[in-house]
Amino acid sequence: MFEKLFLLVKNNAGTAVINNPEIPAKYHEAVINDASSSIIEVLKGQMETGRLKDLVRFFQFPAMNNKSLVSSIVNKFANKLNNFYGVEPAAAMQTAKLLITPVMDEMIKQAKNENNKDFGLGNFLSKLTGNQRDMTGVVNQMMLA
C-alpha cells in the first residue's frame, strides 16, 4: 500500500521535484520519500487524535473538506524541504503545493474507485494503524451516516 503511495507521488513529481532547480538530482528520491511520509504522518495523526470522521469526510466530500488537511500536509512537507534540503521557505511552499495537491486529488479518485482495493479507504486506514485494526467496517458505517 505505501509503495503504491510512493509511486503515486513519484508519478506526480515531474514539475515539482524532478524539473525543479531548487532540488538537486541526488535528492529526488529522498524528497519523494519525504512527500509520501508527510502524507502518511498527517493522515495517521488525524486518526490518532480522534479525527477519523473528519478523515472519512475528506475522502467522501473532498471539495468541502480538503483545505485544512491538504494545508497540513503541504506545510509538513514544505518544512522538510526547508529543514533537510535547504530550499527557501517560499520555494518550499510552492514545491509542496505543486506536488501534494495533485497527489491528494489522485488519492481521493483512487479511494473512490471500488475496483482499486489497494487505495480503498478502509484498507488504507487499516495500513495506517499498522494493520492492528480492520478499519473497513468502521469506514463503511461512517460513510453511511
Image: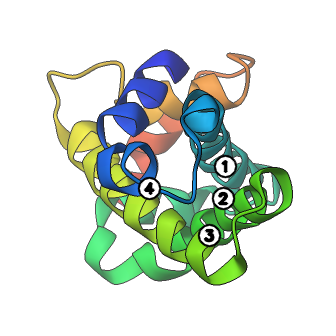
Residue 36 appears at what percent x and percent y? 57, 39
Viewer-proximal residue, 7 or 123?
A: 7
Residue placed under numbered mark 1 in the picture = 38
* Cα distance between the residues tagged 1 and 2: 6 Å
Q: Are marks 1 and 2 in contact (CB under 8 Å)?
A: yes
In front: mark 3 or mark 4?
Answer: 4
Mark 1 element type: helix
Do the residues under discs 4 and 2 have CB atoms within 8 angstroms?
Answer: no
Write the residue at 39% across / 25% down. 7
Q: Residues under labels 3 and 1: Cα distance?
A: 14 Å
Which is nearer the N-term, disc 1 or disc 2? 1
Point out the tag, 3 or 4, that comes first from the N-terminus.
Answer: 4
Residue shown at 21%/47% (left/top)?
109
Tell me the element at label 2: helix
Q: Name the N-terminal-most of marks 3 and 1.
A: 1
Determine whether 37 is above or below 76 in the image. Answer: above
State whether residue 144 appears in this view. no
* Earlier-in-chain disc, 4 versus 1: 4
CB atoms at circles 4 and 1 under 8 Å apart? no
> What residue is pinned by disc 2?
77
Nearer the observer, disc 4 or disc 1? 4
Answer with mark 4 or mark 2, whichever residue precedes in sequence: 4
Under mark 3, the amino acid is Ala
Q: CA distance from mark 3 to mark 4?
A: 11 Å
Name the residue carrying label 4: 20
Label 4: few (<14), some or many (≥20) within 10 Å?
some
Q: CA distance from mark 4 to mark 1?
A: 19 Å
